[in-house]
Image: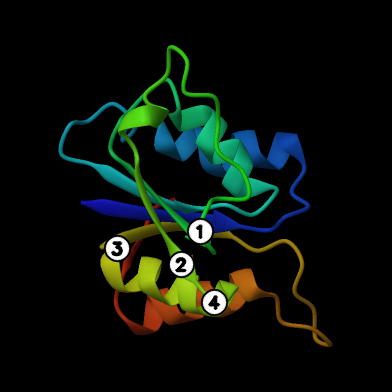
Amino acid sequence: MNIFIFGNGNIRFSDFLEFYEKPLRKYSTQAHVSFSVCDFRGVDILIMELLKSVTQNVTLYHIGERPRYLPDQYKTTVGQWQLCGGFADDRQRDLTAIENCTHFLARDFNSSSQRKSGTLSNIELCEKLDKVRIT
């Protein structure tokens, strides 16, 4: 099981706890579960901080040669994470993470009738590809 975790860059911490941390509790310490995350602000950074002391089963997808953000490796599992970079843009990076996941955890707080967020676009693609949603 590989869970791609993604979301908005401007998430409130209380929403993160409710919609991300709480559903992940039952998966984060299971040896057969791995996680895919990206390196944007908001959900991505909060997830990395949550997982850094819990599991080594993390693949971090990033643009360019190095991640924009990477948690401290001292006394954490971060040194054992897989870094997957070299992507030219967010879309290419996200598509690769979606291709490689079996499940996803995401929530969109920003879309409206005038604007569709990247998060919502990724949710729709995951659903179209029959990825299993974690709630």
Choose the circle earlier in sequence order: 2 or 1.
Answer: 1
Element type at mark 2 = strand
Residue occupying image coordinates x 58% and y 48%: 44
Horizontally, residue 43 falls left or right of residue 5, namely right
Residue occupying image coordinates x 62% and y 33%: 17
**Mark 4 Cα-neighbour bin, 10 Å: few <14, some 14–19, many ≥20:** few
How far is the residue under mark 3 from the one under mark 1? 22 Å
Choose the circle earlier in sequence order: 4 or 3.
Answer: 4
Residue occupying image coordinates x 32% and y 28%: 55
Q: Identity of the amino acid at label 4?
A: Ala
**Relative height, residue 70 to residue 130 (above, below):** above
Q: What residue would you read off at disc 4?
A: 88
Q: What residue would you read off at disc 1?
A: 65
Q: Nearer the viewer, residue 92 or 130?
A: 92
Element type at mark 1 = loop
Q: Identity of the amino acid at label 1?
A: Glu
Q: What residue would you read off at disc 2?
A: 86
**Relative height, residue 66 to residue 46 (above, below):** below
**Relative height, residue 96 to residue 1 (above, below):** below
Q: Identity of the amino acid at label 3?
A: Cys
How far is the residue under mark 2 from the one under mark 3? 19 Å
- The reply to whether discs 3 and 1 touch (Cβ–Cβ < 8 Å) is no
**Mark 2 Cα-neighbour bin, 10 Å: few <14, some 14–19, many ≥20:** some
Q: Residue furthest right?
A: 114
- The reply to whether discs 2 and 1 touch (Cβ–Cβ < 8 Å) is yes
User: In the image, which disc is placed on residue 101?
Assistant: 3
Element type at mark 3 = loop
Residue occupying image coordinates x 54% and y 76%: 88
